[in-house]
Amino acid sequence: MKIAIVSATSTIGQAAARKWAANFSIQKQSELQFVLLGRNQTALETVAADLLVRAPKAQVQVMSLDMLDRQSVEAAVNGLGQLDVALICQGELTDQVSAQADSAVLANSVMVNVLSPTLFAEAIARKFEAQGKGKLAIIGSVAGDRGRKSNYAYGASKAYLAAYAQGLVHRFASTKVSVLLIKPGPTASRMTLSLPNPPAKLAAPELVAEQIVKSIDSGKRGVLYTPTIWFAIMLIVRLLPSFIFNKINL
Amino acid sequence: MSNLQSWGRLPVQKQQLVLAGSAAEELVGQGKASILPRGLGRSYGDVCLNPGGKLLSSAALDNFISFDPQTGLLTAQAGVSLGEIQRTFAPQGFMLPVTPGTQFVSLAGAIANDVHGKNHHSMGTFGDHVTSLTLVRSDSSMLECSQETNFDLFRATIGGLGLTGFITQATIRLQPVQSPWLETENIPFKNVAEFLMLSDESESDFKYSVSWVNCASPANGRGIFMRGNHAGPQFKKNSTTILRSEPGAGKLTVPFDLAFSLVNKASVTAFNLGYYYANAATAGKHVSHYQPYFYPLDAVTKWNRIYGNKGFYQYQSVVPRTGGEDVLQEMLDKIRASGQGSFLSVLKTMGDLPPAGLMSFSRPGITLALDFANHGSKTLRLLDALDEIVLAAGGAVNPSKDARMSREMFEASFSNIAEFNKYRDPAISSAMSRRLLGS
């Protein structure tokens, strides 16, 4: 099984890679191939070394590139060859206050959270279409389910990915290509733990990764909320009438 | 600011948590604010607390770096947990040479507290199996420390309670094992004398031994002696499938904070009676997976919540073997008389391997570890009384688990304090160091 992880240095991307590595017994590890893509070569090599300790017989390749450049992205994806699974994880937790005050922050947020994953998603979709099969998963967020004042710069970019993935699911509905948008709730990651006031309840990345890997492996299509409780929470958040929602501090 | 506590959940002021990068440059230029390395926060007392200051977390440093199956040498970043090491390497035929009673401990935390386990008599402490470590200090130096290089700093850092610098990574030697299973044997004993006899006859043939002892009444002093060895390759066949199901680990939890403690005289007495009879009834030989054998309490995540929101104290002492029987009996009598029994009272003999660290707690003798619900001054008085017994016997109290001992007790427990102070990092201090080392 050949798995490409885009932004493999992200907490969730790395946790998913570790989960796949753990799922393969020593005897079967030689069938496992990882391609780790990202910006930072040194950081990717750290992730690769970690995976090789966990699965010494697996193959691990790293590829650093300009993740915002459409030609680099296309060339990288074309160079991957036959691929079974692709997990797209990049993103930054945009600081809403800075994004409102500084258009450079806003522009960067759109590039990292929208432009880059879209370029990868479409290039991989083309590859899977040509292969006639493949499993594509994109990390979105529960923050994309409803815009709110404390994080709409980030949330809107995740809402864009949700609609994009929805379109891909529709496009590949009657094929062997599965497309899954993953909406993690707040997860204990470098992104959230570095906040000055980290949320009190954060999901463990290992748990989130376990659900992600299981869903991708099973060929699940559509949307995955993880931990599962966030399906119920976001259902309520989405259904709240505006006249109530707009009075709540969220 | 986060509401971070230690595992004992005693009340504490707020502290700020900062994530360390691999060069731990966050240590440099901190000015006057104290900073303290922090792993998984599983220490019971105040060694992992820095009220009013900052905690530099190793949470983002969770990568394995390299492993050589020829030598068993594993290099990993500071924040890798012992559980992660066991889970990763048991299927590859290796395990930690020494592990404490919980796997939710970081690699650096295990070194800084020079932890020990059920095999102290045969394998020494965790520090005995560390071959090198990388230490970042607030003068922005990054030092390789081992038996060969910077040995003084190496020896001060093992068991150095996090006070000598930030450990970013370390190399340890894993032990080869033939299966993740252990052959175990439980033997009931009636009193401390019987416990010592069982220890004497078991130490050469059993790699692991530990005992639970009843310190409530009735039948104070009786207990269960548990000894074991790694099982042979006959258990290897199904090891991967069985490992998947990971017996125990974290399947149960105490899901919310309790306003009061479930631990009281009635529940402790009932537990101690029940625990004895349940184990005495199943005495004999068993085969056990390493998870329930090494980490019985990990089966219930957040078990510390049963002590309610006042938290609890852990008390671990070691007393010399000579005269140890009477000393232990005196301690058990004192605890019984106080009516503040402990749920899990652990009794073990420690071997005479020389300690790896300058400030290692482990030393030859008999160690007793106890948990006490925090009932304020009543509990503190009992612990002070236990200190007096330990002090008179020439023993020591473990600072890694302590939140209340006096400086006198600490100074009586450790003879190398002045030497240790030379290797401390001036930017680093903890609630414990300010309490027991004066800064």
Image (spheres, coloured by chain):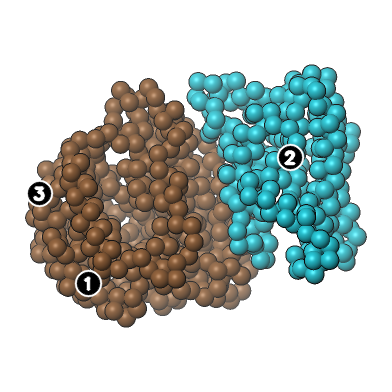
Q: Residues within 10 Å of mark 1 (few under 14, many from 20)?
A: some
- Which residue lies under the disc numbered 3? B197
Q: Amino acid at mark 3?
A: Met
- Chain that is coloured cyan in the picture: A
Q: Is residue B241 above or below residue B374?
A: above
Chain bearing tag 1 is: B
Query: Residue B217's spot in the image, x, y percent?
Result: 16, 65
Are discs 1 and 2 located on one and the same chain?
Answer: no
From this view, report whether residue B176 is shown above or below residue B223. above
Q: Are marks 1 and 2 in contact (CB under 8 Å)?
A: no
Task: Tell which of B301 and B433 is nearer to you.
Answer: B301
Residue at the image point whose x is 58% and y is 26% from the top: A58
Choose mark 3 or mark 1, whichever is in front. Answer: 1
Q: CA distance from mark 1 to mark 2?
A: 56 Å
Measure the C-alpha gap from mark 3 to mark 2. Answer: 63 Å
Q: Which chain is brown?
A: B
Which chain does the numbered disc 2 sit on? A
- Callout 3–callout 1 Cβ contact below 8 Å: no
Q: How far across and down, in percent of the image, does residue A151 sit?
A: 79, 60
Which residue is depicted at the point 36% across and 33% down? B180
Residue identified by numbered label 2: A223
Residue placed at 55% from the left, 73% from the top?
B14
Q: CA distance from mark 3 to mark 1?
A: 28 Å
Residue depicted at 20% across the width and 56% down the height: B273
Disc ID at residue B339: 1
